[in-house]
Image (cartoon, rainbow, N blue to C red):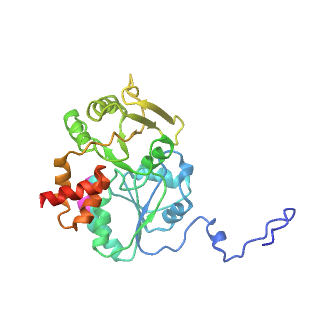
Amino acid sequence: MAHPDPHKGDTPLPQDSPHTRILKLGRVDIAPGLYIVATPIGNPRDITLRALDTLASCDRVLCEDTRRTGKLLAVNAITARMQAYHDHNTDHMIPRVIDWLAAGESLALVSDAGTPLISDPGFKLVRAAHTAGHAVIPVPGVSAAIAALSVAGLPSDRFTFAGFLPAKSAARRRALTDLATAPGTLIFYETGPRLADCLTDMAATLGERDAVIARELTKTYEELRRGTLTELIPDTPPRGEIVILLAPGETPVWDSSAIDAALAERSDLRAKDAAREVSELSGWSRRDVYNRLQSIK
């Protein structure tokens, strides 16, 4: 393949090239449907070109806070019709949104920051749109949980996102107990005033694990702290949005009763398939699990 002469200017792209169209921001023709649009979590430059096109071209923008979304639109010179959609007006708004979709409108759903529906309102609306037969289209972008995981230095091949834990200690510890055996890295959102109590409950419930605190990601005072749960307990409450990431715990030892329960849950499978699945989960050999299954039968 011939290489272009480095001393000559770049060859202009054809006018109908997709590479020319992608650089043109502004109103574009978009199909009717509900667009789930990710917005920046801090740095306004993190918005995608496609998100800007969608926000500039849709019939309405559904947002948690019209003032906050209005600032995002203004800084990008976008004029759009905004409509408040949040947890407190869901029952009232969903029928209206479905009517707008039925009329052939294109609607963008945004949260105050990041990817909608990730610890944000919107689940009921998306489900209602699917039920009514309307298209739901993702316009992906930033998510604080994924951004934190990418820089934490913890295992990222498998993880569990648990959002915000309960505010009260007893309920929080119960929730953590349910996650004690979850495989992979655990990811949580938390507030500054509750951070110390949350880390204390985590250490008491899950044991002394390696952890990462990601605070104010993409913002001026972005901070990443690594250490054990106890080491990361702050003396004073920090400010800003916080992501907590916990390293996986030790693989629990399965006793015979746990094997029996897992096999019972797979009673609809063939014996070999059930033995294979339980073997992979428990660490027991496939032969031992199969023999255990035969003895139960």
- Judging depth in this view, the residue of 191 and 251 nearest the camera is 251
Numbered-mark total = 0
Name the quarter where the N terminus is drawn.
bottom right
Q: Position of residue 61 (x, y in %)?
A: 42, 62
Q: Main secondary structure of the magenta part?
A: helix
Q: Residue at x 41, y 29 (%)?
A: 238
User: Which is more toward the observer, 259 or 144?
Assistant: 259
Asked if residue 217 is positioned above or below residue 192 in the image, the reply reads: below
Using the image, determine if residue 134 lies above or below residue 245: below
Instruction: Name, please, the residue furthest toward the top.
Output: 235
Please name the residue shown 18% across and 67% down the image.
268
Q: Quadrant of the C terminus?
A: bottom left
The answer to whether residue 261 is left or right of residue 183 is left
- Residue at 37 percent across and 32 percent down: it is 192
**Does 217 sit left or right of 231 as displayed?**
right
Residue at the right extreme of this rendering: 7
Q: Quick check: is 89 in the magenta stretch?
A: yes
Residue range of the region highlighted in magenta in the rendering:
88-92
Q: Give percent across and percent down for residue 104.
A: 39, 77
Q: Is residue 131 magenta?
A: no
Q: Position of residue 36 (x, y in %)?
A: 41, 62
Where is residue 110, by image quadrant?
bottom left
Q: Residue at x 44, y 30 (%)?
A: 227
Q: Position of residue 166 (x, y in %)?
A: 25, 40
